[in-house]
Amino acid sequence: ICSRPGRDRSESNVNRRRCLGPRHRGFPFATRRQLMAEMSASGSHQESFMCNRCGGIVPLDRKEAHVQRWCPAMEAESDSDAEVERGTNPKFVMGGVMAACSPLYLDEVTVQIGSKPLMEFTMEQRTMWGDLGTGGVLWYSDRVMAEFLAMHDARGATRGTALVLGCGGLPLSGLVASALGWDVVATDLDPVIDLAKKNVSRNVDVIRSCRVANGGDDQTLFPVFKIEELWFGELDALQHLLSPCNVSDEKPLLILCSDCVWQEFLHAPLLDTISVALHAAPRGAGQALLLFETRTPAMEKRFVHMLGVDELDLDVVPIDTGPVLQRVIWPSLIRESFQRCPCLPDRFNLYRLTARFGPLYSPPKRKHERRFAGLDFDP
């Protein structure tokens, strides 16, 4: 759901992506001379801008926005230290942690899971200003979700179906769930599905190796990993996806959702989807893990309030992300920025949702408009 309608990629955009290719995966460690030489050789030196502060290569039309707001080398600014700690000052989203969290630079990302050293996934990424919008990049909440799954894995625990909502083109938490032995149904909108399938295919060997290490037999070495289109709130389509999964006490349902609450119009259809899926599972056989990074505190407070409304019939338990964050292996630039953040667990909000199965529950009947959750502005 974290995507916007596709756009035709011009030749200049292709040139920009070359400048952001795998050779620059760790751009702070490449020399300025090497980078500029390769840019010149590709004929794209007029298409891109190299930031003197962070060393990043940015499309030229992104120069002003990068320098003013998104450069990872910027410090967060605020008129009040207390406002920074609460995350209520608008300036806090410019520079500092938020800038470092903006995955704008890498065409390929490799993620190692701290709790499971065998899990190392390499995925193709698209710039968030490209044809797939926000759905083409790996957001940091999904790194935390993936680490949480690995950290709390128990050998011999019952596995069933993991339903990933809004997986994007880099379905990291789905890859980890698959490596742990779950059957996976990952969902998003059509523009990102091809990228998601490509990234799953290139990591099948990693999944199999992890399943062998976990004591898997011949039947479990060929993972079930489906990627399907699903709009939040379209409950008939949801039932169609879940019906072949045969959810039961022996095959429980685990719903995973990372960073899908950043647009308020998503809240109601997302929660209807989660509630219906959990109530479709037998009592005690379903749970959802919902994780998001703090960006707009007032809006997110309204979302958390919605979690407790009677018609959803959900029990909601907040989970401390502090222990998990200590295990996450962040890229060096992100790690350095997070070290300056004294309240990092407050930035990543994780909730466990289960169905109450109250006597008055009935599936929601409201209709939801199909709307892309892409960027409607140019930050």
Image (tube, helix red, strand yellow):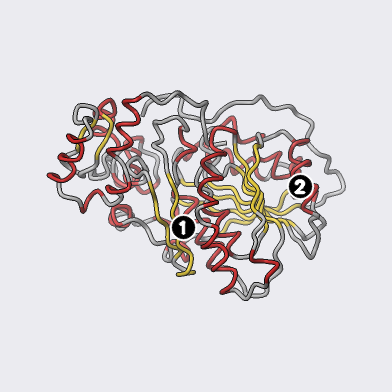
Asked whether 369 or 36 is in front, the reply is: 36
Residue 48 in sight from this viewpoint: yes
Relative placement, left or right, of 2 versus 267 is left
Relative placement, left or right, of 10 versus 29 is right
Asked whether 268 or 128 is in front, the reply is: 128
How crowded is the residue under tag 2: few (<14 C-alpha within 10 Å), some, or many (20+)? some
- The answer to whether residue 311 is above or below residue 119 is above
Look at 73% across and 27% down and name the residue there: 367
Give the image location of residue 185, x and y in percent: 66, 49
Residue annotated with mark 1:
121
Q: What distance separates the C-alpha of mark 1 from that of mark 2? A: 27 Å
Which residue is the extreme one toward the front?
41
Q: Nearer the viewer, mark 1 or mark 2?
A: 1
Give the image location of residue 255, x and y in percent: 66, 52
Give the image location of residue 307, x and y in percent: 65, 44
Give the image location of residue 353, x and y in percent: 67, 53
Relative placement, left or right, of 57 versus 147 is left
Q: Secondary structure at mark 2?
A: helix
Q: Secondary structure at mark 1?
A: strand
- The answer to whether residue 121 is above or below residue 261 is below
Type of amino acid under label 1:
Phe
Residue annotated with mark 2:
242
Q: How many marks?
A: 2
Asked whether 214 or 151 is in front, the reply is: 214
- Of the numbered discs 1 and 2, the one sitting upstream in the chain is 1
